Image (tube, rainbow, N blue to C red):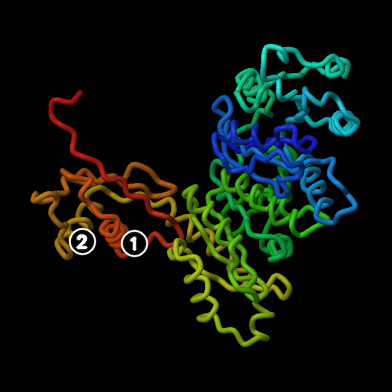
């Protein structure tokens, strides 16, 4: 199921960050009584009514717009509101309804975006009812809450979870297609790369409705294989500041990753690998997606005399956790090696979908253990009973061992590397579950 985005917007100091922390069960957002503390949009994963969501906390929209820094806060709030699947408008019951509150609600009403009004700081018995002016707005969906104490949040969560758009989680066109998400920070050339790929004479291209709100996925046929480019338009839409793009690109990457098989991470080969590159790559690994790393703008790198070996070493050093992912250098501008992308994706997907026979799997583990025996645990020998594959995409294996808690993480890594040497698994994470052997008398 794809992840929906919920934006929390409102004036400064109405309790947006406190509500964010409650909904995400975190302390990620800084809570302070000083207006304007939340300058950047915070985002966090949560589940509302068993629906996976990304919740975005924004800065106040009534700050001094003459200040360039404060103006970015307003832009980020507007960006989050426009891109969200649902908007929670937060107002302050103690302050009452203000002009900015009215304007914000009016704008969202005109946009047709689903939303509710959360009237916050309804904390004590003397404040158990919202002020009359909020009722005069004529809104059906007004929720009196106390973000600090949690009052009213159950009803709010129930409403939001039921109001999120229904999504087709298994469209027919996805059944035999390889789903690709092109991800990466802004300005690395994702749009140009996708456009170049779609203009290939060997591709048959058509647009089809996506499974997320306002998304259009692109269907390709190449070499008798079906591909779906999952919409990443949210990363490419125009924005007024690079800072806004930087923040929101991670959120849109999360949505795309939830629906893909292969994540194509695009880097700027002419620049160093950045922290945001690593952040986006880490999300792909966390979600167990196959990965291909593309170094775009290779025409510029060649001008600076950077060799492929130097670029690959730079990538491997910064993205050590993706050491299994192939690295390809391309140029969307000149078309250099763009024709290699789909064959690489196809190869990675085959590795991602591998099913290993149990006999071959156990033989591989026995050879690895004989070569490098497992150490003892509390004076007792550790023994592997058997192993089996429990899942594909990503390949996931379960080993039954008498003392699984005695396996050091370095030896777990050794076992995974032994699987890679035997079966390949290029471009795909490999997961290894260590479990104790079930007792005979267990049901």
Q: Residue at x 45, y 55 (%)?
A: 350
Where 422 falls versus 70 (above or below)?
below
Callout 2: helix, strand or loop? helix
Q: Position of residue 199 (x, y in %)?
A: 73, 63
Q: Is residue 216 left or right of residue 406?
A: right
Q: Residue at x 75, y 53 (%)?
A: 244
Q: Residue at x 17, y 64 (%)?
A: 372
Q: Is residue 160 above or below residue 183?
A: above
Q: Which residue is mark 2?
A: 368
- Classify mark 1: residues with Cα within 10 Å, few (<14), some (14-19) or many (20+): some
Checking the image for residue 23, the label placed there is: none
- Name the foreground residue: 328 vs 129: 129
Is the residue under label 2 in contact with that under label 1 (CB below 8 Å)? no
Instruction: From the viewer's side, name the closer residue of 402 and 208.
Output: 402
The quarter of the picture where residue 124 lies is top right
Q: Alpha-carbon distance for marks 1 and 2? A: 11 Å
Q: Nearer the viewer, residue 343 or 211?
A: 211
Give residue 420's mark: 1
Q: Quadrant of residue 59?
A: top right
Q: Quadrant of the C terminus?
A: top left
């Amino acid at each position: 199921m794809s992840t929906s985005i919920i934006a929390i917007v409102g004036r400064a100091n109405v309790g947006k960050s406190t509500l964010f922390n409650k909904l995400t069960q975190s302390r990620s957002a800084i809570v302070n009584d000083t207006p304007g503390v939340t300058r950047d949009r915070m985002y966090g994963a949560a589940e509302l009514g068993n629906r996976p969501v990304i919740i975005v906390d924004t800065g106040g929209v009534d700050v001094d717009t003459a200040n360039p820094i404060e103006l970015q806060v307003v832009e980020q709030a507007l960006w989050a509101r426009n891109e969200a699947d649902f908007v929670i408008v937060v107002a302050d019951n103690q302050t009452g309804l203000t002009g900015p509150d009215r304007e914000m609600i009016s704008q969202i009403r005109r946009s047709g975006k689903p939303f509710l009004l959360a009237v916050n700081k309804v904390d004590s018995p003397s404040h158990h009812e919202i002020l009359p002016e909020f009722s005069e707005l004529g809104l059906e969906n007004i929720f009196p809450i106390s973000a600090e104490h949690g009052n009213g949040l159950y009803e709010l969560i129930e409403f939001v979870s039921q109001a999120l758009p229904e999504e087709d989680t298994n469209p027919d066109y996805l059944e035999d297609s390889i789903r690709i998400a092109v991800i990466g920070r802004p300005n690395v050339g994702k749009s140009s790369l996708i456009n170049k790929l779609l203009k290939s004479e060997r591709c048959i291209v058509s647009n089809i409705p996506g499974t997320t709100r306002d998304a259009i996925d692109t269907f390709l046929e190449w070499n008798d294989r079906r591909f779906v480019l999952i919409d990443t338009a949210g990363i490419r839409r125009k924005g007024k500041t690079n800072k806004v793009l930087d923040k929101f690109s991670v959120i849109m990457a999360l949505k795309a990753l939830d629906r893909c098989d292969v994540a194509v991470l695009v880097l700027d080969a002419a620049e160093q690998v950045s922290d945001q590159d690593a952040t986006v790559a880490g999300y792909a690994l966390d979600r167990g997606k196959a990965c291909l790393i593309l170094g775009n703008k290779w025409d510029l790198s060649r001008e600076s005399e950077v060799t492929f070996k130097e670029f690959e070493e730079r990538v491997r050093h910064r993205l050590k956790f993706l050491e299994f992912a192939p690295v390809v250098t391309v140029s969307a501008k000149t078309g250099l090696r763009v024709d290699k992308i789909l064959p690489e994706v196809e190869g990675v997907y085959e590795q991602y979908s591998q099913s290993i026979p149990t006999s071959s799997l156990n033989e591989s583990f026995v050879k690895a253990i004989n070569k490098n025996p497992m150490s003892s645990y509390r004076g007792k020998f550790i023994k592997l009973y058997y192993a089996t594959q429990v899942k594909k995409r990503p390949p996931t294996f379960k080993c039954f061992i008498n003392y699984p808690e005695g396996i050091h993480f370095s030896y777990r890594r050794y076992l995974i590397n032994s699987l890679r040497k035997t079966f390949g698994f290029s471009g795909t994470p490999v997961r290894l579950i260590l479990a104790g052997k079930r007792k005979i008398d267990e049901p």
